[in-house]
Image: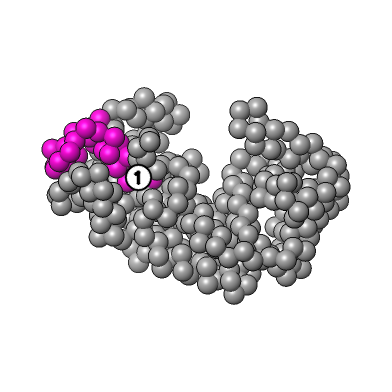
Amino acid sequence: MIAINPFPVSGYRGPDYFCDREEETAQLIQYVKNQQNVSLFSYRRLGKTGLVQHVFHKLGAEKSIRGVYIDVLSCMNLNDFTDLLATAVYTLFPPEHTVGQKITKAILSLRPIITFDDLTGAPTVSLRAELPQEKEAHIRQLFSFLDQRDWKIIIAIDEFQQILEFPEKNVEALLRTQMQQLKNVQFIFCGSNQRLMHEIFNSAKRPFFASCTPMHLGRIPEEKYKLFIRQKFAAKKRKISDEALDFICSWTMRHTFYTQSFCNYLYASPFKIIGTEEVHASAAEVLKIHENTFYQYRNLLTTAQWEVVKAIAKEVRVQQPNSRKFIQKHKLGTPSSVNRILDALLKKEMIFHNSMVSAPYYEVYNKFLMRWLAKS
């Protein structure tokens, strides 16, 4: 049997490889079971997709509930969105089952083009629509198909803020109107852009205002993450010291993706006893592996932008990036130029601004890049 690395960096591998989130899981299940739509926010790669998949796994034990997940980050318009939803529905209810046959028949009524991946056999459903009313009809019919099932259907739409980039200007109103008419379908709207998610759900001028229960996903508590890491190494008779665990949580800042990535690399190493020397050596190797990517980042930014990213990385967290002290220390120019650069870096998602704490701060998104820059 092939040994499985217990620190997956993509996808959901089941509860044995999922760390904590017990309170968040119970809370999200309670919301959807009580017919509350949810707007779930977390910064990118902090674990919101894993949480949704974990909730779907938990709910899977109940035959009366089904979960549909789509990530719309790659969608450029309403057609892309509809195709993604149709594909997810078609995949969830395979045609060899009775219900699947009904769903397939319903989707076929929309005259789709269905193709299959040569390697995986995974289907892709494309619904041809040119006129606005055709696009709206496809969305309405897909939701109606799901609403007519005997189960509660939960649709999780990841990176929901992407709909603001669609050329169609009525997407929010269209989805909100359809959502209000559904009885057996609940929604989890996930997003990683704090400003845009706030705009969609908290602006009184927008269709989704006050339509969802807000939920924010933070970092996994340090002691729980340490226990999880220790147990996974111990299961293979490998020992990791308290000091090494302290370093891992501090160095990755418990940003889930980077903690998982580092532990994945460490687990793949030959070390049987892991202390500070081993984790420091592994950290240096991880940064070396990603170095080419970091240079590509530098080439995509202006010199001034790169210097601001570097300055924030060296400080780890910056509360007042346009302050005289910060600007003079890192020789960044003028406050107005720094403000313009911050806006550009936020849009490029090189940095993020955490305004959901008492003392808001800026931080570099990529924790490996942050550690690499701090050394330069």
- Decide whether the magenta segment is chiefly helix, strand or loop: helix
Q: Is residue 216 visible?
A: yes
Kindly identify the residue that appears in the image at 72 percent across and 43 percent down: 83
User: Residue farthest to the bottom?
Assistant: 34
Quadrant of image for the C terminus: top left
Quadrant of image for the N terminus: top left
Camera-nearest residue between 120 and 51: 120
Q: Is residue 341 magenta?
A: no
Instruction: Determine whether 18 is above or below 338 in the image.
Output: below
Q: Is residue 271 magenta?
A: yes
Kindly identify the residue that appears in the image at 51 percent across and 66 percent down: 28
Give residue 209's position: percent from left, percent from top: 63, 68
Give residue 223's position: percent from left, percent from top: 25, 60
Q: How is the image coloured?
A: one colour
Kindly identify the residue that appears in the image at 13 percent across and 38 percent down: 277
- The amino acid type, in three-letter code, at marker 1 is Pro
Q: Which span is picked out in magenta?
A: 257-285
Drawn side of residue 309 relative to residue 13, left or right: left
Kindly identify the residue that appears in the image at 63 percent across and 69 percent down: 211
Give residue 253's position: percent from left, percent from top: 29, 50
Rendering quarter of residue 115: top right
| Residue designated by label 1 | 6
Camera-nearest residue between 297 and 258: 258
Q: Is residue 205 visible?
A: no
Camera-nearest residue between 190 and 273: 273
Instruction: Determine whether 181 is above or below 339 in the image.
Output: below
Drawn side of residue 189 relative to residue 269, left or right: right
Give residue 356's position: percent from left, percent from top: 41, 63
Rendering quarter of residue 188: bottom right
